[in-house]
Amino acid sequence: MAIIKFLTLKNEAFGLDINDSSLKIIKLRKKYGFLQPVSCNEKKVEPGIIKNGIIQDENAFIKTVKEALTSVKGERLKTKYVIASLPEEQSFSQVIQMPKMKEYELKTAVLFEAENYIPLPVDQVYLDFQIINPIVDHLDHLDVFIVAVEKKIVDSYLSCLKQSGLIPLAFELETQAIARTLIKGEISPSPVVLIDFGGDNTDFIVFSGHSIRFTSSIPISSQQITEAISQELDVDFKKAEEMKIKYGIDSQKKNNKAHAVSKAMAPILEELISQIKKYMDFYSEHDSHEHLSEKNSINKIILSGGGVNLKGIDDFFSKKLNIPVELGNPWINFSEKFKNFGLADIQKKPTAFVTALGLALRGVKNNNKSII
């Protein structure tokens, strides 16, 4: 088993969000005195090139990356340094407790302790960890967040990006990037659930204190909703997507099409709600000693991802889950003076770029504390 540490971030880098159906790029830079996006792109990944986060066709993936790099909107990318995402569904993460010890001792101790939590032979994974600083100092032990990803998966991403002409400074789980974007100051005094409803899957994240505490990948996506509308109403995928956005959830428009769209979406949304409830209950029953200044109950849900561009989705989730739900603000960690910028893609659907934005934020902050 090896602890993987990519290069210390001394070079400005852009964020590259990779998933089964798309690549998303964001480059940040200070402009007029304020940090803001200056380059972006969203490039479709053809079906079969990546499946469940695993690259199936490396040559096709490399070609897609190159095309995405050369067609960015805004400023041309002048750096080859990149912070890239790794798939949540192919990772293993856990908060463990360790006795207080010096950092060099902790590196060795974590290697042995991690064997109890990783469902793969330890010599087949890359492992990284970070100490979670408590809001209320517990004094007697350390909380440590560990992440492991199979070597063959990381090596595949690394090889492909290098062949695309890029220099990966770090890889990071998409959930880490999402939290960096949506949690103000990367600290929450009480547990918050982040739901990233994407085109390929849904990421469920519990964040509290200074760290993610629990994650899971739910195999339900916004694309499945569009496909259900397409089949139910016998329209093509593009038309189904347009109808989904036009009518939304529980639309006030009382017409046959709105009702048909709602009926088509219902089974998938109900299953998603069921899965979210299951993981919220699991977390509530198994949450560890988190050393927070407020009680350890989940106080709200924050939604993000391309799938939340749906009228009424926040109210629907709030009613079904009986908890406050809000749409994520991708600009919460930017200056209040930050106003407009010239990249229409991000302005139109900013929640779809949350992961890429979190990766880009790490790039400009030269922040090496996040993993893997």
Image: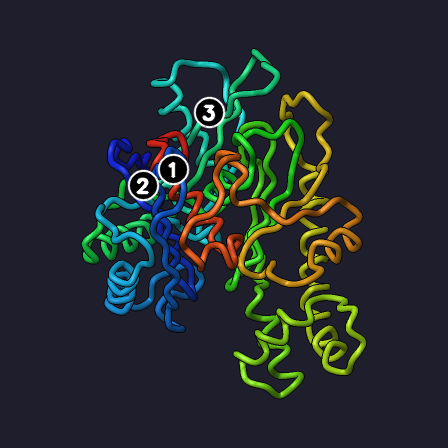
Q: Residues within 10 Å of mark 3 (few under 14, many from 20)?
A: some
> Residue at the spot x=40%, y=73% of the render?
47
> Which residue is denoted by mark 2 in the rendering?
170
Give the amino acid type for the residue marked by disc 3 in the picture: Ile
* Distance from Cα at disc 1 to Cα at disc 2: 10 Å
Viewer-proximal residue among 332 and 106: 332
Q: Position of residue 318 (x, y in %)?
A: 76, 51
Position of residue 92 relative to residue 72, above or below, is: above
Give the amino acid type for the residue marked by disc 2 in the picture: Ala
* Distance from Cα at disc 3 to Cα at disc 2: 18 Å
> Which residue is denoted by mark 1 in the rendering?
362
Q: Secondary structure at mark 3?
A: strand
Viewer-proximal residue among 156 and 351: 351
Q: Position of residue 176 (x, y in %)?
A: 47, 41
> Which residue is denoted by mark 3 in the rendering?
131
> Residue at the spot x=56%, y=33% of the render?
184
Q: Residue furthest bottom?
A: 234
Q: Residues within 10 Å of mark 1 (few under 14, many from 20)?
A: many
Instruction: Give the label on residue 211, or none.
Output: none
Closer mark to the observer between disc 1 and disc 2? 1
Dividing the picture into quarters, in which one does residue 222 lie? Answer: bottom right
Position of residue 244 relative to residue 111, above or below, is: below
Q: Is residue 45 left or right of residue 290?
A: left
> Residue at the spot x=25%, y=53% of the render?
76
Give the amino acid type for the residue marked by disc 1 in the picture: Arg
Q: Is residue 104 visible?
A: yes
Q: Earlier in the sequence, mark 1 or mark 2?
A: 2
Viewer-proximal residue among 246 and 63: 246
Asked if the residues shown at circle 1 and circle 2 are in contact, with their CB atoms under 8 angstroms apart, the answer is: yes
